[in-house]
Structure formats: C-alpha cells, structure tokens
Amino acid sequence: MYSIRLTEDEIPKKWYNIAADLPVEFPAYDQTEEGKQLENLPKIFSKGVLEQELSTERYIKIPKEVREAYKQMGRPTPLVRAKALEDHLDTPAKIFYKREDTSPTGSHKLNTAIAQAYYAKQDGIERLTTETGAGQWGTALSLACNLMDMDCTVYMVKVSFNQKPYRKTIMQLYNGEVLASPTTQTEFGRKVLAENPDHPGTLGVAISEAIEDALNDEKVYYSLGSVLNHVMLHQTVIGQETQKQLEIAGETPDVMVACVGGGSNFAGAVFPFMKDQLDEKINCKFIAAEPSHCPTLTQGDYCYDFGDTAGLTPLIKMYTMGHDYIPPSDHAGGLRYHGMSPLVALLVHEGLVEPRAVEQNDIFKSGVTFARTEGIVPAPETCHAIKVGIDEALECKKTGEEKTIVVNFSGHGLLDLKGYDDYLAGKLD
Ligand SMILES: *Cc1c(COP(=O)(O)O)cnc(C)c1O
C-alpha cells in the first residue's frame, strides 16, 4: 500500500493544545512601557482565537462548521510511502510523507485560514487583513474569507510579488485584494519607503501594515498565518491524522521532519507526536529544517522581540534575528521570517527539537529528486524538509538502520517554478 487514506469521519474532532503538556512554563506575552500592544489584541483578533491563544486545555473542540469546511476542502489528506524515492536512494529506511499539498490552495495554510475566518465571522467582522510571503497564506485566507462571505486584503512582500505574478492572480481569483508591501496606503509603509524607496519588503513590514489597517476600522480584524499559538493549534489536524495513518501502516516514527518559517506546519505535524514522546510512548527525533539564508533557530537569539517590524505586536519570547532584519532574497519566501513560533522555540530551547539549516542549492536538488521519483513538485519551503529527510535516509544507508522517517509535505511548488528555473539554469548562489 502506497497511500494511506482516512474517511471524512476520521477528521479529528478536537485540536491538540501542547500548552497543556509543556515541560516548562510558557513565557507570557509582554508589551513595552509606552506600548498598547496587549490592549490592542482584542481590536484585531476574534474572541475565539484569543481564548485559544492563552488556553491550557489539552483538547479544544473543532466547531462543526469548521470540520465541514475541512471536509469540503479535501481533508483528511493522504499519508504516502515514498517507495520510489527509497528505491532511488537505495536506503533501508522507510520514508512517509503527509500530503498537505492536496488542499485546493496547495498547502497546509487552509487548516487555520478556515478556522480564523470562521471565528471572525462569529464576531460580525466584514474584512480580514493579512501579510503573505510566498503567497500561500494570502491564497488560503482569500479563499477562506470568500467561503465565509468576508473581504480579504493581503499585504504581499514586494520581492515575492515580483517573483511570483501568478500568486497575485490566484488570490484575486479567490476575491482577495493584493498589495505589494511596503505600500503607500499605510503610515508605516510610507515611513519605510521614505527611508528606503527600494525596500524589498519583509514579512515583518507586511504584518505591521496589515495590523495598522485593521486597527483603523472596527469591522476589520487582522489574521496571522503562523507563529501564534492558535495557529499551531489549528494545524494539529495534520499530526493527529498522521498518527492514525501510521497506526494503520503498523509503524511508529523514528524521525519526523518539517520545514519552519513561523513554525506552523512543523507544529501541526509534530505536536501530537511530541505528546507521545513526553509520555514515553515513542522515541523519535524531531527535526526543524530552516534555510541557511534566514537561520532563525540555528543562529538567532532566544529572547523577547516583536513579531513585526513596527512593534505593533506584543513582545514574544522566541528565537529571532531581530525585528528589523532583512533576510537575503530567497526562493523559499515562506521561510523568510525573522522570528519563530514561541512554542516551537521553547521546544528547541529545551532540546526536544533539533534545528537544522540547509542551503538553497541543496534543497532544490532534493526537490528535483523528489519530483523525478514521487512525481510531485514540492514547494521550495517543503524542499527543506525533503532535503533533511533524504539526508536521514542516506545516514540509514550507512548504518543499515531501518528507520521510519516521516516528512511533512507542506505544499506543492507549481506556482513557484521561477526558483526551479533558476536552479536548473545554474543561476542560484
Ligand atoms: C507558509 C509555508 C511554510 C512556512 O510556514 P510555517 O508556518 O513554518 O509552516 C512552509 N511550507 C509551505 C508550503 C508554506 O506555504
């Protein structure tokens, strides 16, 4: 059996909240002395997600409407044995990948977009604003808003906006409004452009613009695609499904890998298994794969910092490159973020998750190998996880170990072909 599929009824009924099981206390959000960052939260987030953000309940019920939307959007997703890749690598390891690319928008992002749009709608909100890097999050939120009959404004990082013109088209097709950030439409955007007219844009700047927009209108909320606890929570449908699927396959994981930008697909895939690990039911190595171009976990400091560049978010204890860091241009736009989920950061800091930085040329090489064996073109972000998965499988070839390796396949790369183009032409540094 290659593809292990669950029925629609087997979609999890609850999200798993790792806050209930952390080995150390979660470092509370903070604000600056003159700042209003914490007071502003209820102006930009729904009651539903704010409650989840601070909850320590282990399981949180998924609303019926959200579960229905998950079904309509193709959940549960398959878990696939990468037999062709294993044969190509000639490894004794078994490699599985969880296919979040099968969502209509092509990534895991819809899992939280649907939930966030649902809770905003419950509060009577008319429009959501957001940032997007590679464009995957803006795409997912545009669709989710349209499904819930709300408008969506997407501040898209300018380098990605220029690299990926079709991303804009697909967001507009889903009824989203797309602006290249920094824009001239917000005070902060104008300030950034005044200082540097050629600013390439960053996720930090785009988040500031989207928050400013939401703060200026009480019918508007802001929605974040990663980093925050409620986003990690919503993504745990991935790992819970994978648990059932591995059980059907008769496997327990020895290694789990996912890429990290803000940490959400990693958290979603891994946190349910982290509970098993803490309960000593499994003995698994968890690896977070990040780009060497933006090495937040391997080179950043573990300290309090803002999630955005203007300092509108609360202070969050996480690994950070600094909130005004401008990462070098990289084709994995979804991983170009200065900070990290505070939950993922805490687990790295406690030694429960191993971070690993990988090079851009190597990740595209792995992506091409994957496409030529398994047939699916991975997103450049996903290639980071595949690269580490392949390295682990090759290590097994040396040692003869038959490890079970699970890679979270966060999304497909069919709208990211520019990066592959440059790789195949030998134009990447
Ligand atoms: C957004 C995105 C990522 C990075 O975000 P996380 O929150 O770290 O998951 C990774 N892969 C894909 C395909 C994405 O769209």
Image (cartoon, rainbow, N blue to C red):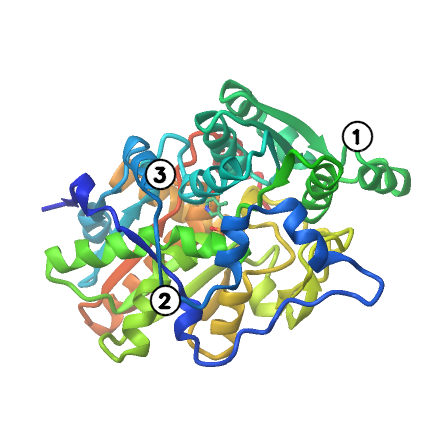
Cα–Cα span, label 1 and label 3: 33 Å
Residue for badge 1: 185
Cα–Cα span, label 3 and label 2: 28 Å
Give left or right: position of 214 versus 139: right
Q: What x and y, as percent, mark residue 279?
A: 28, 78
Q: Is residue 274 above or below residue 423?
A: below
Sooner in the amino-acid sequence: mark 1 or mark 2: 2
Give left or right: position of 200 versus 196: left
Disc 2 on helix, strand or loop?
loop
Q: What is the crowding at mark 2: few (fewer than 14 residues within 10 Å), some, or many (at least 20)?
A: few
Q: Is residue 1 above or below residue 324?
A: above
Residue for badge 3: 101
Q: Residue at x 23, y 43 (%)?
A: 78
Q: Amino acid at mark 2?
A: Arg
In this view, the mark in front (1 or 2): 2
In this view, the mark in front (1 or 3): 1
